[in-house]
Amino acid sequence: LSSVYAPKDFKRLRVIGDIVASCFDYITPFIKEGISTEEIDNLVVDFLKSKGAVSSDYGYMGFPKHICTSINDVIVHGIPSKDDILKDGDIVNVDLTANFKGFHGDASRMFLIGNVSKEAKKLVQVCKDALNTAISICKPGVPLSEIGKTIEEVVNPFGYSISRDFVGHGIGKVMHDDPQIYHFYDKKWDKVKMVPGFVFTIEPMINAGSRECKIDKDGWTARTVDGSLSAQWEHTLGITEDGVEIFTEHNY
Ligand code: MF3
Ligand code: CO
Ligand code: CO
């Protein structure tokens, strides 16, 4: 495990995690029918600037914006645009990674726009439950494969699929570090166990239909091949002596 950090680094990770959580709180009232995803991007830039933080996404492998905005059938990596205007019934994921004093925090949340179908609401809730249940089992000694196993146990009874094309990751002084965190069971991760100081994300992408994805011509936007809805929630986490800390929600 390369993303293992000392207690003094956990203090820094708490600070950036809190900035990311506060940024979500700040943008939430604006995320309504009629706003463009580019306007959400602008709000994030202004908020981060006021805190002395910057987007880690901007310029990452050429990514042109500061957040990812993934609407309806978009699984991940939607690019904010003035032409993408949120409309009644949409579900949208906003994913933000930010850097403060050299430490990264990465989180995403789903937003429901106006009157959303019962089916869409259920998908969003099951995905959130999958993330929270997976977080709840994290502590020293637990194999990384338990994360994917737990997510499958929550998601499979609903007949949804779990995206395999994108994974969680170690994080800290770099945005994307080893190891990869699978959101499905793979015995490959049975032997790798969580240790105190380990910092990583869990970010399940759950599709209402097939798990297969295709990438748009822009080279980023990943959509479900069958056009079905997709949801995602993400937190940055740190393993403590006896459990897990969620950096990207308010702890203090
Ligand atoms: N925040 C994303 C993640 O969860 C990374 C986005 S990379 C970008 O890992 F280039 F698309 F911004
Ligand atoms: Co993210
Ligand atoms: Co991530």
Image (spheres, rainbow, N blue to C red):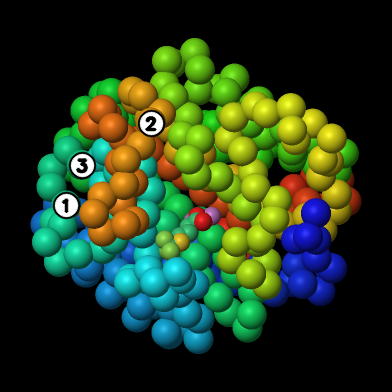
Q: Which residue is mark 3?
A: 90
Label 2 to label 3: alpha-carbon separation: 21 Å
The dot on residue 86 is: 1
Instruction: Check the image and report above or below for 158 versus 172.
Output: above
Q: Is residue 95 above or below residue 157?
A: below
Q: Secondary structure at mark 1?
A: loop
The residue at 13%/47% (across/down) is: 87
Quadrant location, the C terminus = bottom right
Nearer to the camera, 113 or 201: 201
Q: Which residue is mark 2?
A: 212
Q: Which mark is residue 218?
A: none
Q: Which residue is depicted at the point 60% across and 61% down?
A: 176
Mark 3: which amino acid? Asp
Earlier sequence position, callout 2 versus callout 3: 3
Report whether residue 139 is seen: yes
Q: Secondary structure at mark 2?
A: loop
Q: For numbered disc 3, what is the local secondary structure?
A: loop
Q: Tell me where residue 81 sits by quadrant.
A: bottom left
Measure how far apart labels 1 and 2 are at the Cα level: 25 Å
Cα separation between marks 1 and 3:
7 Å
Q: Is mark 2 within 8 Å of ligand 1?
A: no
Whether pointer 1 and pointer 3 mark residues with C-beta atoms closer than 8 Å, the reply is yes
Residue located at (87% from left, 39% from top)? 141
Quadrant of the image occupied by residue 200? bottom right
Q: Residue at x 65, y 40 (%)?
A: 135
Q: Is residue 238 left or right of residue 29?
A: right
Mark 2 crowdedness (10 Å alpha carbons): few <14, some 14-19, many ≥20: some
| Amino acid at the residue labelled 1 | Leu
Q: Position of residue 251 (x, y in %)?
A: 64, 60
